[in-house]
Image: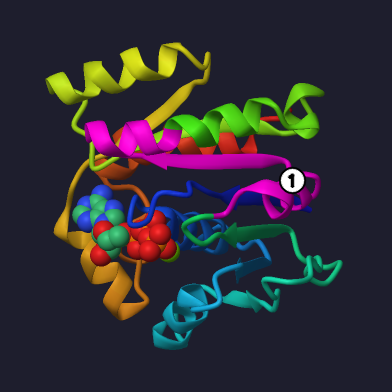
Amino acid sequence: MRKIMVANPKGGCGKSTLSVHIASWFARHDEIVYLGDLDRQQSSRHWLEARPENLATIKHWDISADEFKLPPKHCNVAILDTPAGLHGKRLKEVLNEVDKVVVPVSSSRFDMLATREFFEELAATKAVRKERVDIGVVGMRVDVRTHAYAQLLEFLKEFDLPVVTCIAQSQRYLQAADTGVTIFDNDLNSTAVDIQWRPLLNWLVSRH
Ligand SMILES: Nc1ncnc2c1ncn2[C@@H]1O[C@H](COP(=O)(O)OP(=O)(O)OP(=O)(O)O)[C@@H](O)[C@H]1O
Ligand SMILES: [Mg+2]
């Protein structure tokens, strides 16, 4: 079972957007996908409720904020969306259970500063030090042609972490949040998928 966590303690940086898109991409490739949410607000569950039934199935991973419980054994891909503010003991517990951590970061200076502590905390965690878990950064709402992208790269140099890809700002992600339909449900092979998403998807399936 692949276990992927999407995390960044900064609110609104794109964790849920990434989580539901990763879930739907695997589901479109006939994997048995469970999507969970450590957020008490259960935004992923609400998103799943809005999802039309005729689309590729994504199951709800029933996980509470207090207890970590893996999805059923027949699950191939487990994706865990996490709330803003996740850190400390709780973060460590979850890091012990997953293989990959995707960290969405915007190129806003404030967001980068807010993410600094999180990267420092990650780096100090045993699972990361022992290389049991891979960390990949995704520039969210970042256009690679801009100065903002250069700034993001400069910021990340300090942590020696890969920027796996950048996802540009687009209305389509706002629509996905409202309708339960992702860009992969509409078109699995668009140019945007190839250029922006493919590196992340390849990284997610790459072996540790
Ligand atoms: N690439 C993008 N282009 C346009 N809008 C985006 C993009 N990524 C995210 N958004 C929008 O930004 C808002 C915040 O994104 P999202 O809910 O995914 O963040 P989050 O990190 O899960 O927030 P929270 O910390 O509150 O859980 C949403 O309205 C989402 O649709
Ligand atoms: Mg969220």
The stretch of residues the image draws in magenta is 86-115
Q: Which residue is mark 1?
A: 92
Task: Tell me, yes or no, if residue 27 can be seen here.
Answer: yes
- Three-letter amino acid code at the position of disc 1: Lys
Residue closest to the eye, 107 or 139: 107
Q: How far across and down, in percent of the image, does residue 181 sit? A: 34, 73
Q: Is residue 117 left or right of residue 151?
A: right
Q: Is residue 70 above or below residue 64?
A: above
Q: Is residue 110 left or right of residue 171?
A: right
Q: How far across and down, in percent of the image, does residue 130 sit? A: 82, 23
Residue at position x 62%, y 77% in the image: 59
Residue closest to the eye, 19 or 24: 19
Q: How far across and down, in percent of the image, does residue 66 sit? A: 74, 72
Task: Tell me, yes or no, if residue 17 can be seen here.
Answer: no
Residue at position x 51%, y 62% in the image: 83
Residue at position x 66%, y 31% in the image: 134
